Amino acid sequence: MGKLALEIVTIERKVWEDDGLDMIILPGADGELGILPSHTPLLTALKPGVIVIRKGGSEELFAVGGGFADVRPTKVTVLADTAEHSEEIDAERAEAARRQAEEVLAHGVEAGPSIAIMRQALMRSQIRLKVARRRHRGPGMGASREEL
């Protein structure tokens, strides 16, 4: 079987580019998508979640804040709202952001965009923490479906 190339970009920067990949797992809007070489062309929305890249016996993890993926038989292009490699994530900062968002939501805020913004911040920090925790465990330790 062939290999895949992947490019992850945001409006600010090219986050990742690699080829020779065995598999890419994307957080599709309707569920997880496992992309293998020779995949049928597909354009899909992405929800906030984790991108898992498998190459050889190793994995690379990215926290993404949604976006779109253009899947071709030999290349996947991810246009992400936000994207961070697991090594870029400061777990302590993400945990502090999670606690702050939970506190604000628990004490209530006025209706309107404030609640939506705090819920997004909470979700973003939870995803970042999942990626950071999995990075520290290593690929051999695996993660349950609930953790991804």
Image (spheres, rainbow, N blue to C red):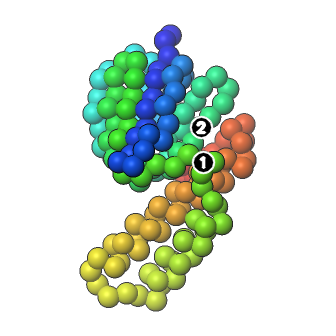
* Image: 38 above or below 136: above
Identified by mark 2, the residue type is: Glu
User: Which residue lies most toward the top here?
Assistant: 1
Between 41 and 31, the one lying in front of the other is 41
In the drawing, does residue 142 fall left or right of residue 49? Answer: right
Judged left or right of residue 96, residue 9 is left
Please tell me whether mark 1 sits on a helix, a strand or a loop. Answer: helix
On screen, 123 above or below 142? Answer: below
- The spot of residue 146 in percent (x, y) is 55, 52
> Disc 2 on helix, strand or loop?
strand
Write the residue at 60% across / 73% down: 96
**Residue 72 against residue 16 in the figure, above or below:** above
Q: Residue at x 47, y 68 (%)?
A: 122
Picture coordinates of residue 131 (x, y %)? 59, 51
Assess disc 1: are there few (<14), some (14-19) or many (≥20) residues with their C-alpha within 10 Å of its C-alpha. Answer: many
Confirm whether residue 47 shows in the render.
no
Q: Nearer the viewer, residue 105 or 11?
A: 11
Which of the 4 quarters of the picture holds residue 130? Answer: bottom right
Tell me the amino acid under the disc marked 1: Ser
Q: Residue 75, how many percent across, how many down?
A: 40, 23
Which residue bears the numbered disc 2? 60
Residue furthest toward the front? 12
Res. 97 image quadrant: bottom right
Residue depicted at 44% across the width and 40% down the height: 14
Please say if the residues under marks 1 and 2 sit with CB atoms less than 8 Å apart: yes
Q: Position of residue 110 (x, y in %)?
A: 32, 88
Which numbered disc covers residue 65? none
Closer to us: 3 or 145: 3
Q: Residues within 10 Å of mark 2 (few under 14, many from 20)?
A: some
CA distance for labels 1 and 2: 7 Å
> Which residue corresponds to mark 1?
86
